[in-house]
Amino acid sequence: MFKVGTAVVTRKDGRLAVGKLGTLCEQVKELNSLGYEVILVSSGAVGLGRQRLKYRKLINSSFADLQKPQVELDGKACAAVGQSSLMAIYDALFSQLDVTSAQLLVTDNDFRDKDFRKQLTETVKSLLSLKVIPIFNENDAVSTRKAPYEDSSGIFWDNDSLSALLALELKADLLVLLSDVEGLYSGPPNDPQSKLINTYIKEKHQNEITFGDKSRVGRGGMTAKVKAAVNAAEAGIPVIIASGFAPENIIKVLQGQCIGTLFHKDAHKWVPVKEVDAREMAIAARDCSRRLQVLSVEERKQILLNIADALEANEEEIRFENDADVAVAKEAGYEKSLIASLANNMRILANMEDPIGRVLKRTELADGLVLEKTSSPLGVLLIVFESRPDALVQIASLAIRSGNGLLLKGGKEAKRSNAILHKIITEAIPETVGGKLIGLVTSRAEIPELLKLDDVIDLVIPRGSNKLVSQIKSSTKIPVLGHADGICHVYVDKSANMEMARRIVLDAKVDYPAGCNAMETLLVHKDLMEKGWLNDIIVDLRTEGVTFYGGPKATSLLNLPKVHSFHHEYSSLACTVEIVDDVYSAIDHINLYGRHVTVVFLISGSAHTDCIIAEDHEVANAFLRQVDSAAVFHNASTRFCDGARFGLGAEVGISTSRIHARGPVGVEGLLTTRWLLRGSGQVVDGDKGVIFTHKDITT
């Protein structure tokens, strides 16, 4: 059973929030099709009616009428008008989804009649058997209360308590109260210090929480929801208070995700899991990073070497935990040589020039006044990755080498592998720095809290799907570095060496199709169509299992299915092919479809990696100069766009941003700059006593 609050179904001006209602109805439709029996309790009628009657009163009033003191509209009349509007929109939305809904209006007095309650249960059972969605509301228009929103007495007193009563009467398995906040907080929800309470324990929380004002439009706000939730939970119905604004929250609740605040009669018996304080974790990582930065070059280097040794020494334990993850996820595990390879890359990083505190530029501003521009760690990084756990080792090694604190959240499919790797790495960090330099986030529920910490966390780097990146960049004020898409192009010019082109195209598409640096679009000079090379390479790729989709020209000439969009990342054995007139047509195509701008923080769209295969160097140079991507190659596979292959030792990801780092992000991409000024007593004083020289000093 779901109860929808007035603040969810209406906008601030009192009108219907059609978009939110549409999302709600789509989720109910999905649950209905999955076999769930869904009952709705919906507020909003009085608010909608008031908005409509105010308008009606305005247009029917004379100017003289409007000068008189305005009498508040009768709440019961508002309810009568608003109820029809509310049900009309529900009916229209559900009809579009091929779902039927039914209206059931009840009053407090109805529940005093046993026969009514019996008939109510039978009617609801009948509707649910036909997959009809019952929608309940209190019939405020004929209620015996003095006025809606004023009288809080009786068997139920608002739609929150009505939903709790109905959940008991109809023996619901779960009651979800949808609100305009994420759940119950320890303080005001807009206070950064307030924490979301995942599980409400009456004995612990009832005297700790002070509720604010009631809902802006509803009857009771969070006070009423908590009271209803406690009553239902004590009677045996689990209750969740969650946000009705967040997309797919209803689906997530039914999937068992940690959403909102749970009320359960046995919650006080549960052994509490030690809560990880997101802010404390981030602050600890920052403090440890500062201790790391003051170590000597040799001491920082030795940390990486110690971790590399520890990885190899614990290879058997790492492989055991990885095998357990593989058995659950049914995915490919670590190759035998991977641990040795990770340890080797870490040693390569350790032996690179120390990146922290390097003097990038030294300038004499005036006699005895010298300014230095130096390299400096960014601070605290939050990396969310869906890839295999070797990413954890690479990211941790880069963070340590660059002097940054680090918070990591890996995918649940590699939970045990990530845990053992994190343990081995942090145990190898000396106490002078502290193992909290690298924090491992174990629950997805902690991510929203971390994304709020723009005063502690300096950069977020998501590694994973387009959906993951989009969700993160829309949920935080912290700068985000990464790429949403990897739509890589290979252009084969008429001057290309055909055997070379064949090898590169096959490698770019087939070597690792899920990689963000795999070819997604093949552009071919029109002359190669006439010479038959294009047909030959399509046969070769199809032999490897590649499915083709064509642009307008390729579709007609090669009889291929038409691609629905050139801006599409397959991440599989599929590819778009198109025929172009010359290199300039290829450049225009790549710059048009390879970049899908999203002006949010640091992330752009694709503009990832693009390649030309050509023997004509004038053509190749035009391509290299004019294609506006993070990496542009000549006669080399796009698969070379990788931190390790670039000699960076490792990468935290590939950035398609124009700001800060671009391309594979290694140690240098995790650094910023600091200015150090050394003087001998100079003061500005209107620049009267200083003779500026602004002379570069070579070191």
Image: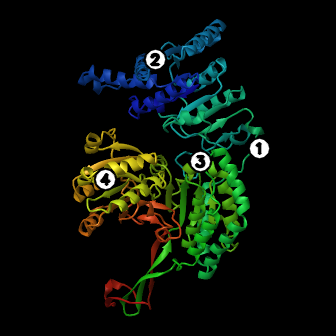
Disc 4 from disc 2: Cα separation: 78 Å
Residue 76: assigned label: 2
Looking at the image, tell me whether mark 4 or mark 2 is earlier in sequence order. 2
Query: Circle 1 sits on which residue?
Result: 271
Looking at the image, tell me whether mark 1 or mark 3 is earlier in sequence order. 1
Secondary structure beneath label 2: helix
Disc 3 from disc 4: Cα separation: 49 Å
Crowd around label 3: few <14 · some 14–19 · many ≥20 (10 Å): some
Disc 4 from disc 1: Cα separation: 67 Å
Pair 4/2: label in front: 4
Q: Nearer the viewer, residue 525 or 416?
A: 525
Would you say 191 lies left or right of 663 here?
right
Crowd around label 1: few <14 · some 14–19 · many ≥20 (10 Å): few
Query: Circle 3 sits on which residue?
Result: 444
Q: Relative to 298, does residue 79 appear above or below in the rendering?
A: above
Query: Circle 4 sits on which residue?
Result: 533
**Mark 1 residue type:** Val
Looking at the image, tell me whether mark 2 or mark 3 is earlier in sequence order. 2
Residue at figure coordinates x 73%, y 32% from the top left: 265
Looking at the image, tell me whether mark 4 or mark 1 is earlier in sequence order. 1
Q: Quadrant of residue 518?
A: bottom left
Pair 3/4: label in front: 4
Pair 1/3: label in front: 3
Q: Nearer the viewer, residue 361 or 340?
A: 340
Crowd around label 2: few <14 · some 14–19 · many ≥20 (10 Å): many
Secondary structure beneath label 3: loop
Q: Quadrant of the N terminus?
A: top right
Q: Residue furthest top?
A: 115
- The reply to whether dot 1 and dot 3 touch (C-beta < 8 Å) is no
- The reply to whether dot 4 and dot 1 touch (C-beta < 8 Å) is no
Query: Which percent across, then down, holds residue 10?
Result: 43, 30
